[in-house]
Structure formats: C-alpha cells, structure tokens
Image: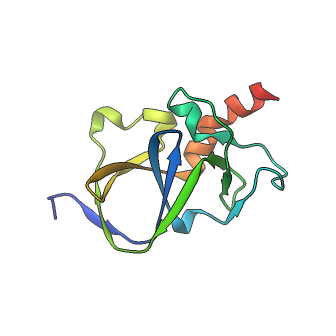
C-alpha cells in the first residue's frame, strides 16, 4: 500500500456516461429510480460535460442526490489514494481521493458535497 493511503470498504462504483465515479456506501441512504424520486438530483454526467438520463439516484441521509447511469457494489477493501493538493477544490471540494478497481482509477467523491455541487445544474433544468 502506498505511503499516505488508507483502506476503505464498501463502495458504489458508478458510471456517468463513459466516465467513472465512486461513492462510499455508508454515505448512501437510499438508491432511487428517477420515476419515483421526489426531489431534485443533478446528474454525475454533468460534471463530465455530458448529459444523459440517469438510471439511478443516490440519495444521502441529508437529502443531497446524484444521478448515475449504472452502479455496482464492491465490498472488498480498497486502498484509498489521496487526491493531489492541486485537485482539492475540484467539483466543489467533493473529491476525496481515488480507488483502483480492476486496473482503473475511480475518483471517490463525497455524495453530499458532489450533490451540492451539481444542485445548481438541477435547478437550471427545472
């Protein structure tokens, strides 16, 4: 394990268009369908400059929500690689680091902060 890294268990590995984004499972209170979700959710695709219809909505206990195209749950412990200081303010400060799964790096985002970052885009779409 790399110096400065720590382990994290319980991840939601999500697709946003062709891009990847991960969330810690303990941050997700519910996973909703867009047809049944009663609130507003920005799509993770918006952060990558692509707009598609989200298939699932990840909702935090505090109500922030992020739409993703697909997700899978990974329960294996993974090394959490720290984000470089240069990227600390990316996406409203929501980048927590990176995890490596099947040879690819996945940005680990805070669901609450990423949901807040995407929220203005969700309001504009209304």
Q: Which colour scheme is used?
A: rainbow
Q: In this view, does 113 lie to the left or right of 121?
A: left
State left or right for residue 61 relative to residue 107: right
Q: In which quarter of the image is the C terminus?
A: top right
Tell me where residue 79 sits by quadrant.
Answer: bottom left
Would you identify the image quadrant in which residue 50 lies? top right
The image shows residue 114 at horizontal and vertical percentages of: 56, 43
Relative to 119, residue 32 above or below: below
Determine the residue positioned at 14% across, 58% down.
3
Q: Which residue is drawn at 48% across and 43% down?
A: 94
Compared to residue 89, the image places residue 98 above or below, namely below
Q: Tag count in the figure?
A: 0
Which image quarter is the N terminus in? Answer: bottom left
Vertical order, 38 against 50 (above or below):
below
Identified at 31% across, 67% down, the residue is 78
16 or 66: which is nearer to us?
A: 16
Q: Is residue 19 left or right of residue 8?
A: right
- Left or right of 109 in this view: 34: right
**Percent position of residue 69, x then y:** 60, 47
The residue under the point 85% across, 51% down is 38
Closer to the camera, 73 or 120? 73
């Amino acid at each position: 394990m790399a110096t400065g890294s720590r382990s994290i268990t319980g991840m939601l590995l999500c697709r946003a268009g062709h891009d990847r984004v991960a969330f810690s499972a303990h941050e997700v209170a519910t996973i909703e369908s867009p047809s049944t979700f009663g609130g507003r959710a920005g799509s993770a695709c918006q952060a990558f400059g692509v707009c598609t219809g989200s298939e699932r909505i990840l909702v935090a206990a505090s109500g922030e929500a992020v739409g993703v195209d697909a997700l899978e749950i990974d329960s294996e412990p993974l090394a959490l690689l720290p984000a470089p200081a240069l990227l600390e303010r990316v996406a409203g400060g929501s980048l927590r680091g990176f995890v490596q799964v099947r040879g690819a790096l996945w940005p680990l985002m805070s669901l609450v902060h990423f949901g807040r970052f995407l929220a203005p885009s969700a309001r504009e779409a209304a």
